[in-house]
Amino acid sequence: MALGATNREKPRLAVIGTGIAGLSAAYLLKDKYQVTVFESQSRAGMGAHSIDYVSNGITRRIDIPLRIFCHGYYDNLLALYDHLGVEILTSDHAGIFADEAGRIILHYGNIKWGTGQFSYLKGLNMLSPKAWIIGLQSRRFFARAMQDSVRSDLAALSFGEYLNQSNAGQAFVDTILLPIMSVTCTCDYQAVRDYPADLMLEYLTCGVHEIGVMSAAKGVDDIVPRMLADVDLQTGSPVALIEPEGELLRIVTSKGREQRFDQVVVAAQAQQAAAMISGFDDRKMLLNRIPFESSSMSVHTDQAILPAAGKDISPVSYHVPRGGKRAEVSVDLSKTIARLSGQETVFQTWNPLRRIAPNRELARVNFTRPTVTRNSRQAVIALRESQNQTGNRLWLCGSYMAEKIPLLEAAVDSSVAVAEQLGAAIPWKVGAAAER
């Protein structure tokens, strides 16, 4: 990118990684700094795994993984998208839950009502005593969770301990709650139980089950270019080393290219950040305390994964084996993403447990995601404190760095915090325009 005289006078800042944390950090800091963004993949990371889906003579992009969000929890993400002019659409994620034999346990739909929604049992499930029991247990759980969400001792409890204390209905927990939260947090059931109770209840009581979810109408390919305008993007440039060099930080890519910057924002996952940095032993030790889990995602057109429940099946199918560590969760993208509605039914399946016909599989991607425990939470607090030191030039940014479940909102939260510490104004915050 050609740099004008004004841009050359700005301090140089590097952002490592182009997930939503890196993209939002680069966007928020580009007015105050000369920003260079490093991405290991051949294209910007938020869309690195997107594929073209051709069906019925139509070609559309499919994001991997599907990214959804809601009011009440994703305040900074929605403010950022509104500021960028990203079109948002509501998305129906009603579900059907089946056991390992394909028997329907619970099948519900959603009806929009004003600005919210309410759920109802579908089809023959209306006659199922077990479905009604689960429904009643669900109502009791959420009613108590709303009351308990203000408890001061929740941070000292794991979510599993909270579930035991609250006497949550076992059928609801095993069949509905753990499968839903394992796919939300992209981890196994035990990791869900290990989350601090206050973080889990903050999400569960934000109203997501009442107001529904949304997604970007045109996917990440509409978002990424807006956020990378006026920055120097270097794709295919995995960073091997970040280390102090005098008053600067030296970056070396795996191809041996060296560059020096006044400030560096590492927006990679914790384990990746730990592998890059040298001369920051205290932070490396803390980063290695952040747990993560690996998952697999398949995009395919194999309808054999659906429960035998007729044509009117809700968009999200949960295959819940008894005694399993995770569910298999399939989203009918043709029903949940408006731009795919005119094409052949296509699914995105997280944690495939059953065989997907090879001639029906379009893509399979493996990825990792951070989780949160009480121990990792203390490590993150220490990492944030280390960034408050005078003269700090290395900034850690990512979903694991916020006081939330590591979702899109946490990633943007962390970038907002770093941008503010580096003197940037946040355009959607009150008074930001006057500060520029």
Image (cartoon, rainbow, N blue to C red):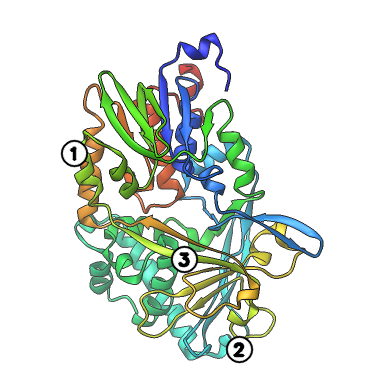
Residue 101 in sight from this viewpoint: yes
The percent coordinates of residue 337 (x first, y second) are 66, 59
Look at mark 3 in the image and give the residue it sits on.
296
Specify the quadrant that holds the N terminus: top right
User: Closer to the camera, 278 or 50?
Assistant: 278
Residue 337 left/right relative to 352: right
The reply to whether dot 2 and dot 3 touch (C-beta < 8 Å) is no
Look at mark 2 in the image and give the residue it sits on.
124
Neighbor class of circle 2 (other Cα within 10 Å; few <14, some 14-19, many 20+) is few
| Residue 214 image-quadrant placement | bottom right
Residue 11 left/right relative to 116: left
Neighbor class of circle 1 (other Cα within 10 Å; few <14, some 14-19, many 20+) is few
Above or below, 294 against 214 in this view is below
Q: Amino acid at mark 1?
A: Asp
Q: Quick one: SS at disc 3?
A: strand
Say the numbered circle drawn on residue 281. 1
Q: Amino acid at mark 2?
A: Leu
